[in-house]
Amino acid sequence: MSALEADPADLAAVEALVRAAGTSFYRGMRILPPDRRAGMFGIYAFCRIVDDIADEDGDMAEKRRRLDAWRGRVQRLAAGTADGPVTRVLAAATARFALREADFLAVIDGMQMDAETAIVAPDLATLDLYCDRVAGAVGRLSVRAFGDASPAADDVAGALGRALQLTNILRDLAEDAGRGRLYLPAEFLAAEAVPMLPAAALASPRLAAACRRTAALAQAHFAAAEAAMRRCDRRAMRPARLMGATYAAILTRLEQEGWRHPERRVSLPAWQKAWLALRHGFA
């Protein structure tokens, strides 16, 4: 029997989409049993598609139309109605793991936030909302596919999603600036007298100080996620622990580098990724 009792051709199409994205996510999710892995591949494929709609060049009205079309697809999932491989796999995963419509819609809302305007120096409240939509909501879908639908698992999703997104923001400063974006919070930039314009912020000698404030916020979220994990099903949290450990290591590397060269994208060496996978992926 195929995973999620889904059409093998649909499963293969979704897996191919995930594999083609060239992300470590594909390898990381291989630790899951087939049904849960297929569910996660469906969730990732959905996120990839709506993110691509938001990021691509084009008319905003057309982007809204396409995002609204995905809102409609999401609203039909609970009824088992689907129009392609991704939605058919998601419909099966929704039925199996009780994935929530509100979380799918929150992801789309987050992508639309990014598409409608170039986010530059948001206040902390706006940044928190953005992180919750583009990362926390993904986490809330994911923990159900992992096997824990408890309130504590939602707490993990919210805290870990924010920690991961803030780490990405700190790692991708130069790439984001090239797109006219600056996600560091206005309060931290103002406190360190860093200009609230992307290129000027990257050139500021006080950039590292604002980044350290943001890193401390990310560290607090990592700690909150770890505490919440202790209230969850340990086996179900294996993928979350692995993602958390990997991104926490990236954040540590960023802190060690001190944002002296934000144009250099920090990554982990292969040996460290393998060690983290052994330590956390099978605990």
Image (tube, rainbow, N blue to C red):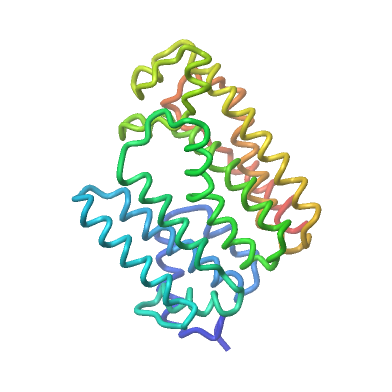
The total of numbered circles placed on residues is 0
At 71% across and 59% down in the image, what residue appears?
151
At 63% across and 44% down in the image, what residue appears?
246
* Residue most extreme to the left: 59
Looking at the image, residue 71 sits to the left or right of residue 235; the answer is: left
Residue 76 locus on image (x, y percent): 42, 77
Looking at the image, residue 67 sits to the left or right of residue 186; the answer is: left
Location of the C terminus (image quadrant): bottom right
Establish if 120 lies above or below 110: above
Specify the quadrant of the image occupied by residue 262: top left
At 35% across and 17% down in the image, what residue appears?
200
* Residue most extreme to the front: 125
Specify the quadrant of the image occupied by residue 31: bottom right
Looking at the image, residue 31 sits to the left or right of residue 86; the answer is: right
Location of the N terminus (image quadrant): bottom right
* Residue most extreme to the bottom: 1
Residue 93 locus on image (x, y percent): 54, 75
Establish if 53 lies above or below 226: below
Residue 254 locus on image (x, y percent): 57, 28
At 65% across and 65% down in the image, what residue appears?
146
Q: Which of 24/168 is in front? A: 168
